[in-house]
Amino acid sequence: MSKDNQVLEELTSKEYEHGWTTNFETDSAPKGLNEDIIRFISSKKNEPEWLLEWRLSAYRQWTKMKEPTWPNVTYPPINYQDVIYYSAPKQKATPKNLEDVDPELIKTFEKLGISLTEQKRLTGVAVDAVIDSVSVATTFKETLGELGIIFCSFSEAVQKHPDLVKKYMGSVVPVNDNYFAALNSAVFTDGSFCYIPKGVRCPMELSTYFRINAANTGQFERTLIVADEGSYVSYLEGCTAPMRDENQLHAAVVEIYAMKDAQVKYSTVQNWYPGDKEGKGGIYNFVTKRGLCFGDGSKISWTQVETGSAITWKYPSCILKGDNSMGEFYSVAVTNNYQQADTGTKMIHIGKNTKSRIVSKGISAGHSQNSYRGQVHIMKRAEGARNFSQCDSLLMGDKCGAHTFPYIDVENNSAKIEHEATTSKIGEDQIFYCLQRGIDEESAVALIVNGYAKEVLNQLPMEFAVEAQKLLALTLEGSVG
Amino acid sequence: MLTIKNLQAKIGDKQILNGINLEVKPGEVHAIMGPNGSGKSTLASVLAGREEYEVTGGEVEFLGKDLLELEPEERAREGMFLAFQYPVEIPGVSTINFMKTAVNQIREHRGQPALDAVSFLGLMREKMKLVEIDQSLLNRSLNEGFSGGEKKRNEIFQMAMLEPKLAILDETDSGLDIDALKIVSNGVNKLRNKSNAVIVVTHYQRLLDYIVPDFVHVLYKGKIVKSGTKELALELEAKGYDWIKDEVSVA
């Protein structure tokens, strides 16, 4: 066996770091999906009638829709009646503050490196912690409240800020937008809600940490971010799940609504359980993320580092409605073993002088398949629109695949569109050069891959960038061959 | 320091080295010359441990260790440095970052603590001066878009940073104009001392005007066919390689 293969063996026997489970009592819905289950979820959450109706209408539309088959991924049919749509850790009452939260839950997040105790946290980040179907804690609520910023779980927002929720929920991702968005709209259980008032610059990073714990459970969370005129917020999202043999479904919806001159930066480090080295188990990550640059001069920027999940299907997009608005998409998607990713973005230019920038870096190793799918649509009214796209693929070994599906529709002749694409392989020459300087093979791969992904990693907030670099190295360790 | 005995190596089915013998002592500079295809660069690659080459016989001792048993990175950590004929580009990785990783892995191997940012920067400044290299070059992606001269100067900078016991310069003069050649040679000369050694692999004599060798060896068909002092290099420059080939075929 060559040395490369040996290293590869070592990697694949390496276990997913966050694969453990926590034992706490849960309160779950029975398996399966029907209108009664939806009523059950809605009543568990003590929801107003309009929201129940909203869910039921989504469900009825969903039953008439078909699961998309166009993504470049394959998986056995999902039995939607075999999924548990609601699972919540049992708590005595709704916790008013951290002292009331089950210590077992706090420990769970601490094990993941997420401290919910505010004093122990870096002061720069506020966290909403979501486990299975519910949010268990949100930190720094009071500090943020002084500035008029609302940052809480989605369920709490429904109770305390129903007008805002009613107005903006579904305004960016309509109920019937796509199969998984419709499913989410019917059964979503929790998530984060954030409102930044006019002219306020949010002084800390807001973040949601998602954890799937229970078996056979799907996670369907919704995040809604509303940035009022001239405001600014940077939002982070992280996620992990235990190792399980069966596949678990994660179908989330994220909506961002940016008013005039508002700026929202949304960063994701996605590390759901990817399945084992044979491709068994892992999360199906079918997510709809979209931002609406509603106001003139607004800006939405997506940055994602995708390393986990058995299958990733997501296209964080921007609708550039306001004149002079801007959308950005920076992505690093890494696939190893039998992972499949079909990810990219949509930039819909509606307003005048709208700009978009797409930088996508795919890295494929093992037997994985990695696709970039991106659409740039310049509508008739979008005088002077500009887009720049760069899609690079890096291959490691000869059993993986990299694919690029760019779609460009231009209805206005004044548009300027640039598209660049490259495909490269980590060269043995590059590795040997590093070895000859005394750098071991693992570090050499990490160095080369991080160099390749640098433009995207540079977009991440500092502490996330360091995490992301480590994660990239970990995901790819020894996959040179 | 380095003892090569009857070293033989091949790539694929092609036998390239046919029994090399060479002894290098601390403080010495050896030049290895020879016509194209004689095996000069192969010798450099085999010593550095490039995987494509298969050693088919002989032995190599480096600082008391069996060199052929060591992985390439271990050879580097033990103090062997190869200045590449064609330095490799690594996009997005600056020379500074690259060297920080290398220096600290070598230090770890030696049981030394990693250098903090300040000490590393200090070390870097000192070595930059020595080889006359500009920091703006070191901030850029390694070798990406570098001119031939910049790449070679960067190799010598790395050599200065890693302070090898034995440096092998593989055709370091190729692609250099006379000014760049002087700067690169100057750097190498400043790094020489009693306890380290240099093997200069070159096709032309002109580099040896600046890096003056103690010994000159002529490699031909995978064997050292003639050894001498720096005068041998001058003779080769004047007469070409044909007389060596003739001598070998007569013998």
Image (cartoon, coloured by chain):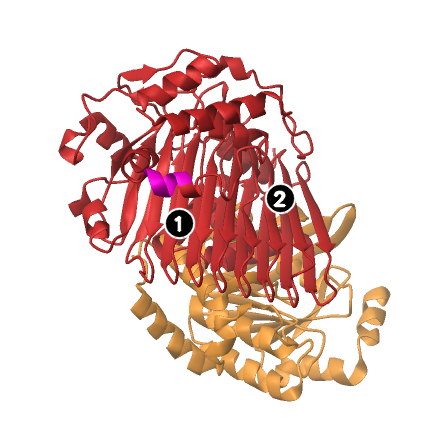
Chain colours: A red, B orange
What residue is disc 2 on?
A396
Picture coordinates of residue A412 (x, y %)?
Answer: 72, 62
Q: From this viewpoint, is residue A425 visible?
A: no
Magenta-colored span: A162-166
Q: Earlier in the sequence, mark 2 or mark 1?
A: 1
Q: Secondary structure at mark 2?
A: loop
The residue located at (69%, 33%) in the rendering is A70
Residue A285's label in the rendered image is: none
Front residue of B72 and B96? B96
Q: Are marks 2 and 1 on the same chain?
A: yes
Judged left or right of residue A221, residue B84 is: right
The kind of residue on which mark 2 rests is Met
What residue is disc 1 on?
A226
Image quarter (top left, top right, bottom left or bottom right) of the C terminus of chain B = bottom right
Q: Is residue A7 above or below residue A382?
A: above
- Count of marks placed on residues: 2
In front of the other: label 2 or label 1?
1
Q: Is residue A86 above or below residue B40?
A: above
Q: Is residue A87 above or below residue A411?
A: above
Q: Is residue A18 magenta?
A: no
The residue located at (56%, 80%) in the rendering is B184
**How many other residues sit within 10 Å of disc 1, few (<14), some (14-19) or many (≥20)?**
many
Residue at the top extreme of this rendering:
A30
Picture coordinates of residue A364 (x, y %)?
Answer: 61, 42
Judged left or right of residue A128, residue B74 is: right
Q: Chain of mark 1?
A: A
The residue located at (57%, 77%) in the rendering is B214
The kind of residue on which mark 1 rests is Val
Question: What's the CA distance linking mark 2 and mark 1?
Answer: 41 Å
Front residue of A225 and A252? A225
